[in-house]
């Protein structure tokens, strides 16, 4: 029925915000989720720094974070894109691995036994192939979801199996190793002293953020996610836009695969399996509404950063790896519980 | 001892400093049908929630059977025989009619095992009290609203109700269904049960109730036996001013111009069986008929949502292929859907985005949406349509029904629509806002030369604002009433004959 948030007969209780106070206050009101995340991140930072200042605050620590987090960051943004229309993409890790495996296979064909020595041209070819894999895989998901109207969770669960299976057939199981130097640069290189994966992440995040907040496509995506039926009645070409969003998701996933295999100098059909659920949780943690219509790149980026600080802190404190998973889960549940509680207060 | 069942004495209630109820005194007598009227925001819902124990009043007393109730809680309220039927009905959609009706009894007796034979017996008895037949095995969510409502009423009776409060019960009903609901209400009353009928529809109030209380801005403005009121006086009390009752006349147009829309032999499989229709600039043509008459499918076909339609559609004399919504919009056709909340609006998105949803390309420069231009366009529309909102950035869900409807209409004005199809344009909109929406529609027709097709169940609305009314039945147009000649009686009789 009508909005539960506004009892029909109670006068509009939301008082007008003071005109003074300006943009900053408005920013805080509109993005309170992000403000909260920043506060939590800062808190994690301070606590970790206090517990182990000599190790946590070392430059090396932050540098290693800047190499590791872009993979999960891109995957989380990819998942967020799918969630914006109320869907999900469970095949992202499969796409990432398939992209890397296909590129690796290409390298082995180009120079059997000596693929690590391949030049820039071959590396670019491999990168191109990986990106095409992302686009095609995304298009397949988009076709199944937007055209054949298969529920996203089922469609992508299915394609995920297909992609992983394909990668498994190509590799026969063990990891492909020996990538060209320019390929491994993507995961390990530095540009102007900054981790290349981090630069890549920053550029892509900014680009996606721009697309979502400033273009007609981004606006339409949000509208479809808010109310797909109303979008049809408003004349939006929902099928096409949803299709495109999954293509973009696939592309981002393949780039994450590039970084992952560049960093490890290897490609395998089942790398980074734990990333999938982490990406889902990071996206939600970053303020994405899994039902669609709300989410921001900034929120997701901060969320992934917060988690990375947390886990690096616990690693420095020599917590067992098993315990770290447990703490991650607990942390995510805590933040989500806070969000739910705050939303309820706002509505009540 | 008076005959008062529940009495509010000088009740006041504030929310965040704003007075929702101000010195309200109201008595519902045993076995009476009492109407509580008022626009949205007048305090009707707050009264319901005070009576049902959801809200505690800040001041004043509640008396039940002449004895003051210290602290009214939902449990207390139910225990004293007060049942509320909210608009959403609060039924279990995935359970059968029988299960819904027997549930309370099972819960009360703390039973763990369900006996199906007995479940059906309980349910049958409950429906018999209302004198209605329903498929007991059907899932409640598969039933039409009107039938679900009956289940809700039957369930309330099961709970030994002495007073049933119905919150806007007729909002989602067609005329025939309203009649049936009114019959059922009278049946309940014969059992000695009081009914508080909360509504803002004049005709129903005048037809059903014995006493009427009108509220405005949290206060009771007038109270008395229904015989003391007329439609006009109720409207005046609700809105605080008189509303125009002038009927619509189409401005003169040159007949040589081809009609804006000319439909010939339009068919939609299973719904529309050959319809001819002409809409000229400045026309407001009404379209009525029972649910299932094909009227909505006719509209959807014109809006490109039924690509399986047959027949020819000409726009401004040229044949148009309307196979997608995009086609329809390019031909200047706009559709304001039946269900504003699920089909019309993006509730959590801003007013501005809601308005611009169909014309984003027009405010896009290169790759980006020109925000300044978008704001100018939407602010201009907010002014032109007199939409009461704090700003264009307010989520549209915070607006009242009437303002929301204006947002949807504004969206189509921005696409330069020349044909406006409205499906139930004022359903769930309060009286004052309703008049304003009618004024806007009339202005659009007369001043901007829009051709309007208005689908509605509201006969007075059609009579007042259309220059012709078409009656649809089983996929065909069976009757045409010219504006000014038809009356409520003649249309009502025609509609009744279709049943």
Image (cartoon, coloured by chain):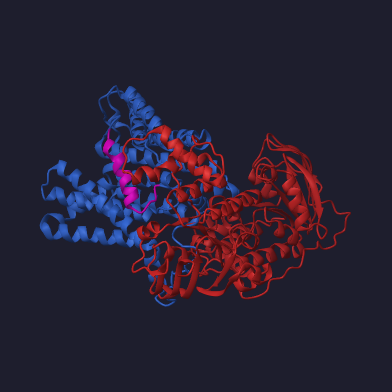
Tell me where residue B422 appears, x and y as whole percent.
67, 54
Residue farthest toward the right in the current orientation of the protein? B256
Prevailing secondary structure class for the magenta stretch in the rendered image: helix
Tell me where residue A139 appears, x and y as whole percent.
47, 35
Q: Residue A282 colored magenta? A: yes
- From which residue to which does the magenta span run? A271-290
Say above or below: B228 vs A75.
Answer: below
Q: Residue B471 colored magenta? A: no
What is the count of numbered marks?
Answer: 0
Say above or below: A91 vs B302.
Answer: above
Say above or below: A117 vs B342.
Answer: above
Q: Is residue A313 left or right of residue B84?
A: left
Q: Is residue A78 visible?
A: no
> In the figure, residue B198 lies in which quadrant?
bottom right
In terms of depth relative to the viewer, which is nearer, B154 or B237? Answer: B154
Q: Is residue B50 visible?
A: yes
Tell me where residue A285 appears, x and y as whole percent.
31, 51
Residue found at x 46% / y 53%: A212
Say above or below: B326 vs B234.
Answer: above
In terms of depth relative to the viewer, which is nearer, A264 or B6? Answer: B6
Q: Is residue A244 left or right of residue B383?
A: left
Colour red maps to chain? B
In terms of depth relative to the viewer, which is nearer, A6 or B116? Answer: B116
Q: Quadrant of the C terminus of chain A?
A: bottom left
Colour blue maps to chain? A
Q: Is residue A234 left or right of residue B256?
A: left
> In the figure, residue B435 lies in which quadrant?
bottom right
Residue farthest toward the front in the current orientation of the protein? B1
Tell me where residue B401 appears, x and y as whole percent.
56, 61
């Amino acid at each position: 029925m009508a909005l539960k948030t506004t009892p029909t007969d109670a006068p509009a209780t939301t008082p007008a915000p003071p005109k003074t106070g300006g943009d900053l206050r408005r920013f805080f009101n509109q993005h309170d989720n992000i403000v909260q995340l920043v506060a939590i991140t800062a808190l994690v930072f301070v606590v970790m720094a206090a517990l182990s200042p000599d190790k946590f605050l070392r430059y090396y620590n932050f540098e290693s974070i800047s190499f590791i987090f872009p993979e999960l960051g891109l995957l989380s943004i990819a998942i967020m894109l799918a969630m914006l229309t109320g869907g999900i993409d469970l095949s992202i890790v499969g796409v990432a691995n398939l992209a890397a495996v296909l590129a690796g296979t290409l390298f082995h064909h180009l120079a059997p036994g000596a693929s690590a020595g391949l030049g820039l041209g071959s590396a670019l070819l491999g990168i191109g192939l990986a990106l095409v894999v992302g686009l095609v895989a995304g298009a397949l998901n988009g076709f199944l979801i937007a055209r054949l109207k298969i529920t996203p969770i089922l469609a992508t669960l299915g394609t995920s199996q297909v992609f992983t299976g394909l990668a498994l057939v190509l590799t026969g199981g063990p990891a492909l190793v020996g990538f060209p130097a320019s390929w491994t640069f993507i995961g390990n290189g530095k540009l102007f002293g900054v981790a290349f994966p981090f630069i890549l992440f920053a550029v892509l995040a900014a680009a996606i953020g721009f697309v979502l907040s400033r273009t007609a496509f981004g606006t339409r995506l949000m509208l479809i996610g808010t109310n797909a039926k109303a979008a049809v009645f408003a004349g939006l070409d929902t099928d096409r836009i949803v299709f495109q969003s999954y293509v973009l998701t696939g592309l981002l996933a393949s780039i994450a695969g590039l970084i992952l295999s560049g960093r490890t100098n290897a490609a395998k059909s089942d790398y980074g399996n734990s990333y999938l659920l982490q990406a889902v949780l990071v996206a939600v943690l970053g303020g994405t509404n899994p039902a669609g219509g709300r989410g921001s790149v900034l929120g997701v980026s901060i969320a992934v950063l917060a988690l990375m600080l947390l886990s690096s802190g616990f690693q420095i404190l020599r917590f067992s790896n098993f315990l770290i998973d447990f703490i991650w889960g607990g942390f995510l549940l805590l933040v989500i519980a806070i969000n739910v509680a705050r939303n309820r207060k706002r509505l009540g | 001892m008076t005959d008062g069942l529940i009495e509010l004495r000088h009740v006041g209630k504030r929310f965040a400093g704003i007075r929702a109820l101000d010195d309200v005194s109201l008595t519902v007598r045993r076995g009476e049908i009492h109407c509580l009227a008022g626009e949205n925001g007048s305090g009707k819902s707050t009264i319901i929630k005070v009576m049902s124990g959801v809200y505690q009043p800040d001041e004043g007393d509640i008396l039940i059977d002449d004895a003051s109730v210290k602290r009214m809680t939902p449990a207390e309220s139910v225990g004293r025989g007060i049942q509320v039927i909210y608009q959403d009905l609060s039924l279990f959609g995935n359970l059968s009619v029988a299960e819904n009706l027997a549930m309370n009894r099972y819960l009360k007796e703390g039973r763990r095992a369900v006996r199906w034979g007995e479940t059906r017996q309980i349910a049958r008895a409950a429906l018999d009290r209302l004198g209605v037949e329903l498929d007991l095995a059907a899932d409640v969510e598969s039933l039409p609203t009107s039938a679900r409502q009956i289940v809700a009423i039957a369930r309330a009776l099961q709970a030994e109700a002495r007073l049933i409060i119905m919150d806007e019960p007729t909002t989602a009903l067609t005329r025939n269904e309203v009649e049936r609901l009114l019959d059922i209400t009278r049946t309940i009353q014969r059992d000695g049960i009081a009914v508080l009928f909360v509504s803002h529809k004049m005709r129903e109030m005048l037809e059903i109730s014995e006493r009427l209380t009108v509220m405005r801005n949290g206060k009771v403005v007038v109270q008395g036996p229904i015989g003391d009121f007329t439609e006009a006086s109720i409207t005046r009390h609700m809105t605080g001013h008189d509303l125009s009752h002038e009927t619509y006349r189409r401005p003169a147009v040159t007949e040589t111009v081809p009609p804006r829309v000319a439909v010939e032999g339009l068919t939609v499989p299973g719904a529309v069986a050959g319809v001819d229709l002409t809409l000229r600039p400045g026309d407001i043509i009404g379209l009525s008929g029972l649910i299932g008459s094909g009227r909505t499918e006719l509209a959807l076909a014109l809006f490109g949502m039924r690509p399986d339609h047959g027949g020819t559609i000409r726009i401004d004399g040229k044949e148009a292929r309307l196979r997608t919504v995009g086609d329809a919009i390019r031909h200047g056709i706009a559709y304001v859907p039946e269900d504003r909340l699920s089909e019309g609006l993006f509730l959590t998105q801003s007013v501005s985005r809601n308005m611009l949803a169909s014309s984003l390309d027009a405010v896009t420069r290169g790759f980006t949406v020109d925000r300044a231009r978008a704001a100018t366009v939407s602010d201009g529309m907010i002014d032109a349509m007199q939409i009461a909102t704090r700003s264009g950035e307010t989520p549209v869900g915070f607006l009242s029904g009437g303002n929301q409807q204006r947002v949807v209409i504004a969206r189509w004005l921005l696409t330069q629509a020349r044909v406006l199809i409205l499906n139930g344009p004022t359903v769930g909109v309060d009286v004052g806002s309703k008049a304003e929406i009618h004024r806007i529609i009339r202005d659009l027709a007369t001043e901007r030369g829009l051709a309007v097709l208005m689908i509605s169940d509201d006969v007075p609305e059609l009579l007042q604002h259309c220059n012709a009314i078409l009656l649809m039945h089983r996929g065909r147009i069976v009757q045409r009433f010219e504006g000014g000649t038809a009356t409520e009686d003649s249309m009502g009789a025609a509609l009744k004959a279709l049943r």
